[in-house]
Every structure is written in structure tokens, then in C-alpha cells.
């Protein structure tokens, strides 16, 4: 990503090639809607760029659901740059490899070493509890924002610009950033019409199992002790599992055809139904699932890339799942939201006069929309690759993966 080039194109002078804590000489009051990972990252980056930030969250307390999340090097590099490297290291587990297995037998077909992430991408890969990542982003954002909890935004005036809360209170600012997730209200304002996210045909169960229970079984110890990411690829279904929280918890994500679940971060699923849905998988996975007491169930949504993320007034923009929800099959949803925030903060740190705002916001969209659109498409592609049915295409996939694994392990 080259915000400097975009800033030059936007007619803004470029002083440094890196974003070294530069502050805008014209300060905006930015109203951020949504205290998810994207909203918090935006609050941090915009605050650091010298702007005043008010963040509105509908919930009465901040937090995240009980599940794991993958922090890929494109994000850990940013978090390190923002000074959160030690905090990330303290709460993250560094996986050594990803191992992909056949669903029924557990036979290894794919293997990619991940210990060289630092050399290849300049930062490590981490597995982490969502609540820990959310807390880390909150700690980064807190000094730079006024947080309004219990503050549901019910409408946005794109010309004033302002947000109206459920209480009736109207808060005016200079720019509204819609980081309000997949059911975004701000998106409707930007587009001028509704454009709901689309079901992808898949849903996921998510569960966390205490690792000590698994380590007692020698067969499972083999899988769980090394902090690898293990995936099982099966017809219309796949499973990803990894260690979090100092390898004390084992996080399991099970993707399967959607059977009428709801799009919600907190809906409970049935652990027995989950076990039944994966009854033809590797006996070791079934043993792991035997320890699951409760599970969360998500309907997975995405949408085709939007034509624009900016209201014609150039006062309301979108960020994160509000504009680019995607299947989690490349672990990039939150990553893209955090990257959006980094680029937005970088560009708006160059603001010297209000007249530059439209060009800088346009540069934000020009830089981010193609990258996130590509990531949305790639995430869909992984759905096809992971979920191939038994037959020639699946055999070819596995043969290609075996060959690559041999090279990797040689
Ligand atoms: P959200 O997290 O949805 O936050 C939106 C916030 O806005 C919420 O707090 C909500 O309460 C608030 N809000 C909504 N409307 C209003 C309103 N009107 N007024 C005030 N507040 C409002 N991503 C990765 O990078 N790596 C992974 O490994 C990964 N795994 C995933 C696994 C699964 C099963 C799923 C479903 C997703 C996964 N993702 C992953 C994607 C990632 O979780 C999302 O992309 C990310 O959480 C989006 O963040 P956000 O801030 O844009 O939106």
C-alpha cells in the first residue's frame, strides 16, 4: 500500500515516506460508528493523526465473543508499529505450520511452514482470543477517543454532518466513519439504498476446549501439543483448529452448509447437532468434539464489492465489514478493517486545509477498495477449494498439496 503516492495524486504534499506520527495541521472531529476491531483501529489511527474522535457503540459494554481469531503478518506488522508488539506477543500463540488433512482419515495432504513469517513478511503470525485482540485495540484507541456506550446511532445526516442517537441526541462532527459491521446503517446512507449482505451458503460452529483435556489423550496430544493450525477438508465442510491463550485453550471452527442459522455473533448452536454434522470426519476430531460443552453458531455473509464507500457529500465513509464483509476462509475480515484504519489515518494525517478532504477520502477508497475486493474474491475461492467433494477434482487438489508439502518438509 502506498498512501504517499495517493496523497501526492490528491495534491497533498508528502513529507515522509513513512507515517512517523505526523499530525494533521487541520483538525477534524470524526464520528466513528461501531466499537468493533475496525472502529477501534480507526479511533487509534485518526486520533494519532491529530483528529478528535468520538466513537459510538450500541452495546452497553465493550467486549468480544468467546472464540479465536488469526492475526496474520499484515496486521501484526501494523500492531507492532503502533507499539502493541509486546502486548500481542503476551496474548498470542505463534503457530509453527498449517497442516491440512483429509476429512475422513485425517491423512496429512498439505503442509506449510509458518516459522519464517518474520523473514518473509516482516512480522509473525499469531492465534489469539478475540477478546484479547479487542482489548489490545481498545487500549491503543482509548487515549485518543471519547467512547459513548449505549449509544445506538439511528440516523446519519450526510450533509450536516451529524449522527442522531436512539436517545434523540444529535452529535455534529466533520466526518462520519461507518464501522458498524455487516448490518451497517451507515452503508445505507452512503449508497442511498439498502444493499443487505448475502448469505454465502455456509455457517460455522465455534467452540473452545480446555487443552489439558486433550493433552491427556496420546492420540490428541500429537495434534494439539505443537502449536500448528490443523485443517480438515471435506465435502461442503471444513474444520480449522488452533491453540490460543498460552496453548491452554484449543479453538475449533467448523464450516458447514447453512441450515437456517442466524447472522449473529452470539447465537448458541447445538453441540450434539455439531457432532452429528461431522460424524464422518477423522476419529481424532470427533474425540475433540466430544469435549465440547457449548458452541456458538454464525451464518456467514458476504457481499459483492461496493461501487463506492463514500457519500457524494464526502462527509460519510465506510470501513471494515460495513463495506467489505467476507468469508473468514482467508482470515482477513478484521485484518482488512485494521488495514483500512491504518491507511485512513495515514492519509488524514496530511490534512492541512478542509478543501483537501474529498481528495484524501477518494485516495482512501482508491487504495482500499481494490485490495479488499480481491480479498473477498479469494476468500470465496477458498470455499470452493476446501469443500471439494470426493472425486477427480479433490484428488488433484490433494495431489498438488502433497507435492508442495514434500518440498516444504524436505
Ligand atoms: P464488527 O466487529 O461487526 O463491529 C461493528 C460494531 O458496530 C459492533 O460493536 C456493533 O455493536 C456496532 N454497531 C452496529 N450498528 C450500530 C449502530 N447503529 N450504532 C452504534 N453501534 C453500532 N477476521 C480476521 O482477520 N481473522 C480471522 O481469523 C477471522 N475469523 C473469523 C471467523 C468467523 C467465524 C467470522 C464470522 C469472522 C472472522 N473474521 C476474521 C472476520 C472478522 O471477525 C470481522 O471481519 C471483523 O470482526 C469486522 O470488524 P468490524 O469492526 O468491521 O465490525
Image: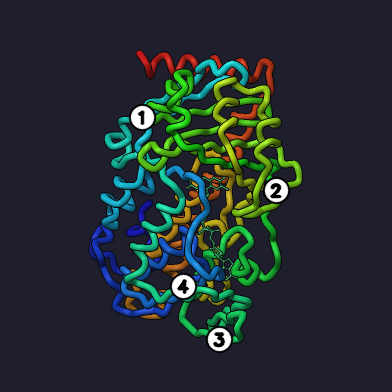
Cα separation between marks 1 and 2: 33 Å
Per the image, label 2 sits on a secondary structure element best described as strand
Tell me the residue at 47%/31% (across/down): 213
Which residue is identified by label 1? 96
Which residue is identified by label 2? 199
The residue carrying pointer 4 sits among few (fewer than 14), some (14 to 19) or many (20 or more) residues within 10 Å by Cα, namely many
Tell me the residue at 58%/75% (across/down): 153
Q: Is residue 349 above or below residue 158?
A: above
The residue carrying pointer 2 sits among few (fewer than 14), some (14 to 19) or many (20 or more) residues within 10 Å by Cα, namely some
CB within 8 Å, label 1 to label 3: no
Of marks 1 and 3, the one in the foreground: 1
Considering depth in this image, is 375 or 183 the residue closer to the camera? Answer: 183
Q: Is residue 11 left or right of residue 18?
A: right
Q: Is residue 398 left or right of residue 354?
A: right
Tell me the residue at 37%/69% (across/down): 46
Considering depth in this image, is 316 or 123 the residue closer to the camera? Answer: 123
Q: Position of residue 200 (x, y in %)?
A: 68, 44
Which residue is identified by label 4? 55
Is the residue marked 3 within 8 Å of ligand 1, measured from its CB? Answer: no
Which residue is identified by label 3? 170
Amino acid at each position: 500500500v502506498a498512501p504517499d503516492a495517493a496523497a501526492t495524486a490528491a495534491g497533498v504534499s508528502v513529507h515522509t515516506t513513512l507515517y512517523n506520527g505526523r499530525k494533521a495541521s487541520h483538525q477534524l472531529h470524526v464520528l466513528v460508528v461501531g466499537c468493533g476491531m475496525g472502529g477501534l483501529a480507526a479511533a487509534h489511527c485518526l486520533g494519532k493523526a491529530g483528529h478528535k474522535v468520538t466513537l459510538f457503540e450500541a452495546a452497553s459494554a465493550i467486549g468480544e465473543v468467546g472464540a479465536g481469531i488469526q492475526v496474520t503478518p499484515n496486521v501484526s506488522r501494523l500492531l507492532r508499529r503502533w507499539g502493541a508488539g509486546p502486548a500481542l506477543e503476551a496474548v498470542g500463540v505463534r503457530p509453527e505450520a498449517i497442516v491440512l488433512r483429509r476429512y475422513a482419515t485425517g491423512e496429512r495432504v498439505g503442509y506449510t511452514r509458518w516459522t519464517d513469517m518474520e523473514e518473509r513478511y516482516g512480522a509473525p503470525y499469531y492465534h489469539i482470543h478475540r477478546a484479547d485482540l479487542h482489548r489490545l485495540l481498545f487500549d491503543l484507541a482509548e487515549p485518543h477517543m471519547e467512547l459513548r456506550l449505549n449509544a445506538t446511532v439511528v440516523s446519519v445526516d450526510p450533509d450536516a454532518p451529524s449522527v442522531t442517537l436512539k436517545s434523540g441526541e444529535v452529535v455534529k462532527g466533520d466526518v462520519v466513519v461507518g464501522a458498524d459491521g455487516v448490518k451497517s446503517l451507515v452503508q445505507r446512507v452512503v449508497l442511498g439504498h439498502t444493499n443487505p449482505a448475502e448469505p454465502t451458503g455456509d455457517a460455522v460452529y465455534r467452540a473452545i476446549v480446555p487443552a489439558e483435556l486433550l493433552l491427556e489423550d496420546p492420540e490428541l496430544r500429537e495434534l494439539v501439543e505443537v502449536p500448528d493450525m490443523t485443517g480438515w477438508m471435506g465435502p461442503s465442510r471444513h474444520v480449522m483448529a488452533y491453540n490460543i491463550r498460552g496453548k491452554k485453550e484449543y479453538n475449533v471452527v467448523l464450516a458447514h452448509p447453512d441450515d437456517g442459522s442466524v447472522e449473529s455473533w452470539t447465537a448458541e448452536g447445538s453441540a450434539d447437532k455439531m457432532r452429528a454434522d461431522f460424524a464422518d470426519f477423522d476419529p481424532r476430531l470427533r474425540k475433540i468434539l466430544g469435549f465440547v460443552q457449548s458452541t456458538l453458531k454464525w451464518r456467514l455473509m458476504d457481499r459483492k464489492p461496493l461501487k463506492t464507500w463514500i457519500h457524494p457529500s464526502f462527509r460519510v465513509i465506510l470501513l471494515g465489514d460495513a463495506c467489505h464483509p467476507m468469508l473468514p476462509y482467508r482470515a482477513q475480515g478484521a485484518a482488512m478493517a485494521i488495514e483500512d484504519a491504518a491507511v485512513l489515518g495515514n492519509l488524514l494525517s496530511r490534512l492541512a486545509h478542509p478543501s483537501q478532504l474529498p481528495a484524501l477520502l477518494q485516495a482512501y477508497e482508491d487504495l482500499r477498495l481494490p485490495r479488499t475486493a480481491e480479498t473477498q474474491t479469494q476468500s470465496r475461492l477458498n470455499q470452493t477449494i476446501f469443500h471439494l467433494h470426493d472425486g477427480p477434482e479433490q484428488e488433484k487438489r490433494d495431489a498438488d498439496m502433497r507435492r508442495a508439502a514434500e518440498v516444504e518438509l524436505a
